[in-house]
Image (cartoon, rainbow, N blue to C red):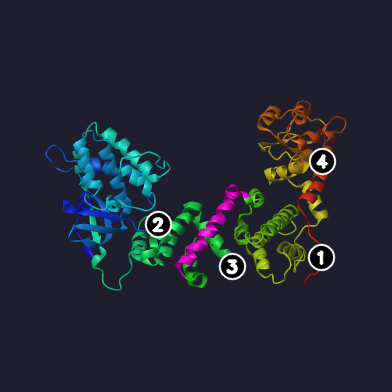
Amino acid sequence: MKVSQPNPIVDFITSGGSGQLTFIVPVFQRTYSWQKENCLKLFNDVINGIPDENCNIKKEHYFGNIVYDGSEHDPFTNYTKYVLIDGQQRITSTMLLLAAIRDEEKNETAKKCLESTYLKNSNTPEELKLKLRTEVDREAYFKIVNNDLTNINEDSLIYTNYLYFRELVHKAKKTYSSEKLILGLRSLQVILIDLESRLPGAESPQVIFESLNATGIPLTDTDLLRNFLIYHISPDKQELYYKEYWLKVEQNIPNERMPDFLRRYLIMRLGKEVKLEVEYKTFTENYENLFENGLEALKELRKYSEYYKWLKNPETLPLKLQKTASLLREANLLKLTSATPLFLYLLNELENDPAEINATIRIILDWSFRARISNIIDSGEIVNLLTSGILDIIKAKTSKERLSQYLKFELSNFRARDIYASDKDFEEAFSRFNFYKNYTRYVQEKLAESFSNDTHLVLETVEHILPKSFDPKKWPDISEVNHAKFVDRIGNLVPMNKKDNVSNANSGLDKKEVNLEKSDWLITREAGKYKIDGKWTTESIENRSRDLAKKAVEIWSGPIKRTRPLEE
């Protein structure tokens, strides 16, 4: 390992002007992540480092360490590949700033000089022309350096920061020339650490990368998982497998959701709870038990990342699985996040029998909704059953019975106690439940669907017929006590478009029933038949609630008759 004295970063980029080079960002590196504030600080440091009229540098700035492996050197062409272990964020940002300086330069000769000195190599194969090679956002960076912004990915952070540097340079050029800005860049000092001379048996570049970054901005689960998996692939296959498998994982799962995905995936695979913030540690500890090799791990994570994306965004499912998409949308409306490991497992079984898996998911939705409404078991036990309990039941299946039938039997015949609400208990609880506070959109959509086939209608708002804000003058037949008791029951709630809802406000029935009767929703239009002597009363609400509860019993299927005795 060789450590240099502080050097200007631009000297490193040009090898001191003596040779050609390419900086390689290895696939185990974190993705480019500099934000606008990072770019502004870099640019301000450059401005502060511009020499004064007497050529005295105002201020040198320590720009950090650059750790690299420079062992690939061709003495005949004086060409070197530098594999960046630490410092790729700074190198990439510096190159984007140099591209911005070039593109804001009006003099064509100076422009070409900037490009050939800092951005490109001459007399090298095409794949080595650029002085920086990165996999993520490679196309965007390539287009920027080649001054061709047509069809560029405008969401690319590399492109976003390049445009910001252009803006900063454009303003600065009113005062400073390109030459002055380059002199300012020379004030950014880095210490170079070359790993070429590390001893045999020393830590790998990937391990060194993790250690170095552990002292700075913490590595995310995405960074750690990528590093770990790629490190378990042979070097000659790393780039190929990175593109074919890992990039798909990152495309399926946003960085902020990776911890949740990893945790839910591990719960499914290990069959036990995995605590928050130790998911990566748990993965590495169980890696050898879960996978034969790194390729198997990458393939599996790519597959399950796709399922996870489906769970979070059901609209991304293939057209042939639209029934499944509809069920997953229901799960999201019910906020069944604890069931993610269970759904991941079932989605993996879809290929074998989609209809049967859909039927099984339907039973899970029906059971969980009935359990929550009837309060037959507490919320903690519902979460435990959704997280791992039902998954354990499914994995224990040994009979040739169809999965949906088997699961319905087990939930209806739970050994310790009854956990599947009967029709009677569910109907009674449904008619009295507060459906404005909980499951509002979900229940209204399901009930409305049972009234008509107007599935194209979009639920905009839910209207209280008896208003939420109570005015006894407008509703003289209802006491304040009964208002509080009945206002949020299902019988008092109807789907309504936003315009009519705003128009209704806290009006009396005489104004509201005009919008009720002309509603696009059949379930809303039919609410009027529950008036008693032309009035909307607590008895109206109670009667409508009971009728809707009877429909609910048909929509959310109940248990089969218990045939296995309860165990003490």
The residues tagged by marks 1 and 4 sit, at their Cα atoms, a distance apart of 31 Å
Amino acid type assigned to the residue bearing label 1 in the image: Arg
Q: Is residue 368 visible to us here? A: yes
Q: Position of residue 294 (x, y in %)?
A: 45, 67
Q: Which residue is mark 4?
A: 544
Q: Which residues are magenta?
A: 293-319
The residues tagged by marks 1 and 2 sit, at their Cα atoms, a distance apart of 53 Å
From the image, give the main secondary structure of the stretch colored magenta. helix
Given this view, does label 1 or label 2 mark the residue nearer the observer?
1
Task: Tell me, for residue 118, which label it has, or none.
Answer: none
Q: Which residue is mark 1?
A: 562
Q: Residues within 10 Å of mark 1 (few under 14, many from 20)?
A: some
* Lower sequence index among marks 3 and 2: 2
Q: Secondary structure at mark 3?
A: loop
133 with respect to 367 (left or right): left
* Lower sequence index among marks 3 and 4: 3
Amino acid type assigned to the residue bearing label 3 in the image: Lys
Q: Position of residue 34 (x, y in %)?
A: 36, 47
User: 403 or 192: nearer the eye?
Assistant: 403
The residue at 67%/50% (across/down) is: 323
7 with respect to 232 (left or right): left
Q: Which residue is mark 2?
A: 218
The residues tagged by marks 4 and 2 sit, at their Cα atoms, a distance apart of 56 Å
Q: Secondary structure at mark 1?
A: loop
User: 528 or 243: nearer the eye?
Assistant: 243
